Image (cartoon, rainbow, N blue to C red):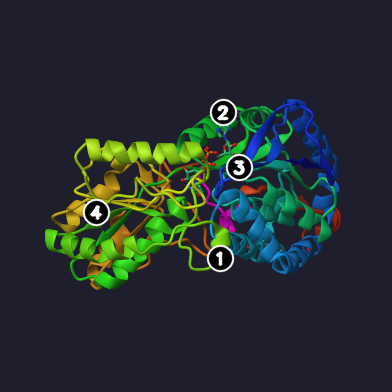
C-alpha cells in the first residue's frame, strides 16, 4: 500500500509519529494509501526550516517572486490532467469538476502575479517641514493554512499563492482525506523555482492543527472547513495572538420568484444542488419558491431532471453528473438526516435512499433527494447536510422568503431568480449574506474580487483572495523621515513652507 509523506524542506519526508490515517477511494470503498499524521515535533521541524528560509524570500524582489508563480501556472496547465485524476481518485468528484477545482485555484495564482502592484506602498512628501512619510506592506513571516477535503487544490492555492507572493513562508495542513494533490502542488512550486522551505506540507489531524495554533513562530492561520472547527481555530488562534481568518459552513438559499424563467431556475438548481454530490460550501441546499403555484411548477420541472441524474465513479466518463461522497461516515450522516426529514414531516418527493450502483456497492454513492414542505424547525433545514439533498421551503411572499434566508445562522451564499429588476436590487441590498447571485445560482467571486460569507460562515475581518489577501498576508509599517540636508545651514529651510 502506498505510504504518503509530508513535504518538508523540499523533500518528501516519511511520518515519524507512528500515526496514520487511511486515504480511501470513495468510489470503491477501498483503502488506497495511508497518510502520516504529524506530531508537534514534526510540525516544529517544518516551522524551523520555514523561519530560516523566509527572510531571504522576503528580501527577493516582488517581481522575481511573481515569476515563480508565473512558471507555476504553466506547470499547472501542463499537469492539469494528472492533477485532476489524482484529485478525483481521492475525493470522488468527476474529472471536469476536479479540473475546475485546479482551475479556480490557478486563477488566484494568476491574480497574485500582480503582487508587485498590490504591494506598492504609499508616500507623502513634505508631511511636515523637511519630513517625508511612507507606508510599506511587509511579510508576516511564517504563515499556515488548514484546508478542507472538498477543494483540495483550489483552497490551498487561495491561501499559499498570496502568502508566498507577499514574501511569507507557508505551511499547509491539508485535509487528511485527500492529501495527494496538495503534495503535488508543493512539488510543482519548487519546480517553478520556489526556494526550499517556503512552501511545506505537513499532513495530520487535530494534533497537527493544535501544534500550529500554539506555535510561537507562526504568525497567521487561514482555515476553511466546518463551522464548529472554524470557531475553535479562530478563538484559540486569536488567544495566541495570531492573525486568523476562518471560513465555515453554509446553508445557501435560492429564492425563486413567480416571474422567474422556471426552466432556467430548475436547471440552475440541478447544478447547484446536486453537482459535486452537494459537497460545496456554495451549493444551494434550500429552494424557496414564492407562492404555491411557483412551488408546484418548480417541483414539476425538478423531478424529471433529478431522475435523469447520472451518479457514478469519475472513471465512467464525462456524462456522470456527480460521484460518491467522501467517506462512509459522510454517507451515513446524509442518510440519517434524510430520515429525520421524513420523521419530522417533510415530503420526500424524490427518494434516493435505496440507491446502489452495480459493481460499486461498497462505494459511498448517495442517490439524489428532493424534499418539499420543509419547515424552519426541521433538522434538514437547520443543518448543513453536505450531500445531494435539496429542501424546498414554500414562502407565501417575497418578504417571507427574504427573512427566511436572513434568519438562518449561515450566510455564505444565496441567489434569487426573477425577471424583476426592483426585486433583485432590493434583495441584493437587504440580504445579510456575503455572496449574492441574481439569476446565478453559485455566485463564486472571481479571483480579483474577494470570497467570504457573513454570520456563522466566517470568523475574522478579511475575505479570501482579491485585494483582501494582500492585506491578510502583510503588515503595514509607516516610516517618518527627516534628513539634515533638507535644511540650510543654521536650521533654515530651502523652501519656506506656507503657514
Ligand atoms: P472539517 O472542519 O472537518 O475539516 C477541515 C480541516 O480541519 C481539515 O484539515 C481537518 O483535518 C481539520 N480538523 C477536523 N477536525 C478538527 C478538530 N477537531 N480540531 C482541529 N482540526 C480539525 O471540514 P471538511 O469536512 O474537511 O470540509 C467541509 C466543510 O468545509 C463544510 O462545512 C463546508 O461548508 C466547509 N467549507 C467552507 C468553505 C468556505 O469558504 N466557507 C469552503 C469549502 C468548504
Disc 1 under 8 Å from ligand 1? The reply is no
Whole-percent x and y of residue 171? 72, 42
Q: Which mark is residue 402?
A: 4
User: Magenta region: which residues?
Assistant: 460-470
Q: CA distance from mark 2 to mark 4?
A: 34 Å
Q: Which is more toward the observer, 190 or 178? A: 178
First of labels 1, 3 by sequence position: 3
Count all numbered tags in the image, as a single digit.
4
Q: Residues within 10 Å of mark 1 (few under 14, many from 20)?
A: some
Tell me which corner region of the image, top left, top right, bottom left or bottom right, holds residue 76: bottom right
**What is the magenta segment's predominant secondary structure?**
loop
Could you tell me which residue is drawn at 68 percent across and 28 percent down? 211
Which one is in front in this view, the residue at disc 2 or the one at disc 1?
1
| Quarter the N terminus occupies | top right
Contact, mark 3 vs mark 4 (Cβ under 8 Å):
no
Can residue 153 be seen in this snapshot?
no
According to the image, label 2 marks what residue?
Answer: 236
According to the image, label 3 marks what residue?
Answer: 30
Question: In the structure shown, which secondary structural element does the residue marked by tag 2 occupy?
Answer: helix
First of labels 2, 4 by sequence position: 2
Amino acid at each position: 500500500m502506498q505510504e504518503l509523506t509530508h513535504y518538508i524542506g523540499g523533500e518528501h519526508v516519511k511520518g515519524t509519529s507512528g500515526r496514520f490515517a487511511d486515504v480511501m477511494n470513495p468510489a470503491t470503498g477501498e483503502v488506497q494509501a495511508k497518510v502520516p499524521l504529524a506530531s508537534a515535533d514534526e510540525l516544529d521541524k517544518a516551522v524551523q526550516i520555514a523561519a530560516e528560509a523566509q527572510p531571504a524570500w522576503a528580501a527577493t524582489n516582488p517581481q522575481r517572486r511573481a515569476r515563480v508563480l508565473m512558471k507555476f501556472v504553466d506547470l499547472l496547465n501542463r499537469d492539469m490532467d494528472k492533477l485532476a485524476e489524482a484529485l478525483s481518485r481521492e475525493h470522488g468528484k468527476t474529472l471536469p469538476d476536479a479540473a475546475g477545482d485546479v482551475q479556480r485555484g490557478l486563477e488566484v495564482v494568476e491574480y497574485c502575479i500582480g503582487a508587485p502592484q498590490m504591494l506598492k506602498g504609499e508616500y507623502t512628501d513634505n508631511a511636515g517641514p523637511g519630513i517625508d512619510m511612507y507606508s510599506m506592506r511587509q511579510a508576516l513571516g511564517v504563515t499556515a493554512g488548514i484546508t478542507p477535503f472538498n477543494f483540495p487544490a483550489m483552497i490551498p492555492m487561495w491561501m499559499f499563492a498570496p502568502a508566498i507572493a507577499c514574501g511569507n513562508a507557508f505551511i499547509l495542513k491539508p485535509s487528511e482525506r485527500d492529501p495527494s494533490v496538495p503534495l503535488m502542488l508543493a512539488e510543482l512550486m519548487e519546480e517553478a523555482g520556489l526556494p526550499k522551505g517556503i512552501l511545506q506540507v505537513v499532513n495530520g489531524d487535530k494534533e497537527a492543527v493544535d501544534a500550529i495554533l500554539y506555535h510561537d513562530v507562526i504568525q497567521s492561520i487561514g482555515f476553511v472547513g466546518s463551522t464548529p472547527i472554524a470557531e475553535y481555530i479562530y478563538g484559540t488562534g486569536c488567544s495566541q495572538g495570531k492573525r486568523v481568518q476562518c471560513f465555515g459552513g453554509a446553508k445557501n438559499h435560492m429564492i425563486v420568484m413567480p416571474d422567474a424563467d422556471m426552466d432556467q431556475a430548475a436547471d440552475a438548481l440541478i447544478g447547484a444542488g446536486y453537482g459535486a454530490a452537494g459537497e460545496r460550501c456554495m451549493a444551494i441546499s434550500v429552494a424557496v419558491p414564492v407562492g404555491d403555484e411557483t412551488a408546484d411548477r418548480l417541483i414539476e420541472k425538478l423531478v424529471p431532471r433529478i431522475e435523469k441524474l447520472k451518479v457514478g465513479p469519475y472513471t465512467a466518463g464525462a456524462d456522470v453528473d456527480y460521484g460518491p461522497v467522501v467517506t462512509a461516515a459522510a454517507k451515513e450522516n446524509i442518510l440519517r438526516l434524510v430520515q429525520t426529514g421524513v420523521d419530522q414531516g417533510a415530503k420526500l418527493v424524490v427518494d434516493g435512499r435505496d440507491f446502489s450502483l452495480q459493481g460499486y456497492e461498497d462505494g459511498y454513492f448517495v442517490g439524489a433527494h428532493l424534499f418539499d414542505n420543509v419547515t424552519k424547525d426541521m433538522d434538514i433545514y437547520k443543518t448543513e447536510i453536505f450531500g445531494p439533498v435539496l429542501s424546498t421551503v414554500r414562502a407565501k411572499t417575497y418578504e417571507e422568503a427574504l427573512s427566511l434566508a436572513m434568519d438562518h445562522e449561515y450566510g455564505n451564499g444565496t441567489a434569487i431568480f426573477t425577471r424583476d429588476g426592483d426585486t433583485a436590487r432590493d434583495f441584493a441590498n437587504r440580504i445579510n449574506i456575503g455572496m449574492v447571485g441574481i439569476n446565478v445560482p453559485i455566485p463564486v467571486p472571481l479571483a480579483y474580487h474577494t470570497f467570504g460569507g457573513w454570520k456563522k460562515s466566517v470568523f475574522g475581518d478579511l475575505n479570501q483572495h482579491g485585494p483582501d489577501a494582500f492585506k491578510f498576508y502583510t503588515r503595514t509599517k509607516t516610516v517618518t523621515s527627516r534628513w539634515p540636508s533638507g535644511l540650510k545651514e543654521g536650521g533654515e529651510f530651502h523652501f519656506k513652507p506656507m503657514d
